[in-house]
């Protein structure tokens, strides 16, 4: 039956009321289905399981010999040499890198040219060539002297006595590291907004104070992750000092592998695991250093692994309680 415009609808003609919906607590949001992600996850898990099974069951790896060699005194002595060389080279490289980076930004064209040439040279020459050249440096220069340039020498040193294996390794790695550290530091300094420099200059702050209290703390947020990558590379580069007759971790493993040819594979696995431990320790330090310098730059600091574990455990308990309530 037709109805005049504007007429009210009677109660008898009103549509039936919808059934009351379920309580909000009983409703569950269904996540979006992602079959591709599940397939990729399954494939990765199968591959990882096959690799782990092969490592555990293949007799070629000789895990019993691995356990025997892992904490042997010869290996630990080589590990201490690796730590010593890496630490000293890192300090030398960082100091040299900072000086080269400051020279690169200097107003003196001579300092800029020397800094650029140094970085270009040592980034172009392979590290093994630098080490071998320094190891045979005494063939070029028998003595080293201090005195007036192009004049008489006041103090003379016998280069063959000064250039020990440890000295050659540290200087070679340090010189090479300084070239890369200089570019890392320079990039971090350039990442600081120019307005920060202008504001510090407008306040009349001394140049040294501007650098140490304003520019450097901000630059460290960019320098830290890049330089830690350099440190990880430096730890692995210490394996090359074996070629200058210094028995580090890799050198010790190589020497014992020559004496015990049947244990070459487990010995290489020992060196691999120790390098993994060292680089992992550096990565942990990197995380906490980055977290420290992130203060003031982010609203919330990134959670530590312990905080992540606690948050995951809390979320899991909350989920279990919610499902039990339903």
Image (cartoon, rainbow, N blue to C red):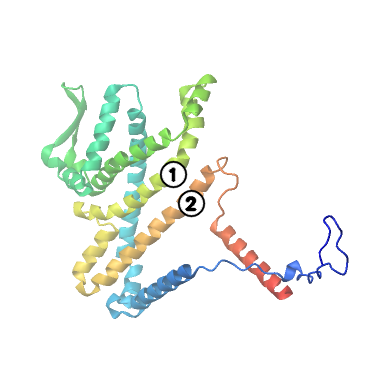
Q: Furthest-left residue in view?
A: 139
Residue in view at x 35 percent, y 65 percent: 273
Q: Position of residue 272 (x, y in %)?
A: 32, 64
Residue in view at x 35 percent, y 25 percent: 106
Vertical placement of residue 90 versus 157, above or below: below
Per the image, label 1 sits on a secondary structure element best described as: helix
**Horizontal side of residue 103 vs 199, given as left or right:** left
Per the image, label 2 sits on a secondary structure element best described as: helix
Question: Where is the N terminus found, in terms of image quarters?
Answer: bottom right
Crowd class of label 1 (few under 14; some 14 to 19; many from 20; radius 10 Å): some
Crowd class of label 2 (few under 14; some 14 to 19; many from 20; radius 10 Å): some
Residue underneath mark 2: 287
The answer, for residue 204, to whether it is visible in the render is: no
- Name the residue nearer the viewer: 151 or 53: 53
How many numbered marks does the figure carry? Answer: 2
Q: Position of residue 198 (x, y in %)?
A: 49, 23
- Name the residue nearer the viewer: 224 or 47: 47
Q: Position of residue 13 (x, y in %)?
A: 84, 68
């Amino acid at each position: 039956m037709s109805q005049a415009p504007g007429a009210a609808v009677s109660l008898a003609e009103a549509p039936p009321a919808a059934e009351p919906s379920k309580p909000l607590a009983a409703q569950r949001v269904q996540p979006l289905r992602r079959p591709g992600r599940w397939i990729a996850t399954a494939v990765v898990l199968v591959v990882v399981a096959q690799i782990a099974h092969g490592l555990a069951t293949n007799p070629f790896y000789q895990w019993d010999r691995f356990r025997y060699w892992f904490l042997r005194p010869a290996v630990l002595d080589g590990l201490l040499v690796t730590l010593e060389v890496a630490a000293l080279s890192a300090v030398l490289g960082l100091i040299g890198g900072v000086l080269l980076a400051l020279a690169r930004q200097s107003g003196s064209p001579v300092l800029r040219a020397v800094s650029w040439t140094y970085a270009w040279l040592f980034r172009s020459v392979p590290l093994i060539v630098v080490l071998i050249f320094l190891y045979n440096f005494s063939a070029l220069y028998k003595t080293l002297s201090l005195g007036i340039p192009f004049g008489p020498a006041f103090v003379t040193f016998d280069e063959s006595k000064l250039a020990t294996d440890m000295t050659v390794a540290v200087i070679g790695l340090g010189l090479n590291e300084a070239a890369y550290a200089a570019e890392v530091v320079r990039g971090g300094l350039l990442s600081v907004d120019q307005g920060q420099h202008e504001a510090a200059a407008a306040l009349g702050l001394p140049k040294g104070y501007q650098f140490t209290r304003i520019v450097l703390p901000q630059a460290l947020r960019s320098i830290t992750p890049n330089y830690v990558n350099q440190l990880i590379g430096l730890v692995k580069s210490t394996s090359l000092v074996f070629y200058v007759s210094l028995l580090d971790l890799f050198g010790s493993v190589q020497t014992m592998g020559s004496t015990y040819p049947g244990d070459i594979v487990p010995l290489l696995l020992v060196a691999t695991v120790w390098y993994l431990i060292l680089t992992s320790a550096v990565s942990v330090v990197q995380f906490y250093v980055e977290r420290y310098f992130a203060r003031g730059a982010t609203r919330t600091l990134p959670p530590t692994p312990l905080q992540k574990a606690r948050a995951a455990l809390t979320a899991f308990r909350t989920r279990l309680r919610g499902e039990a309530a339903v």
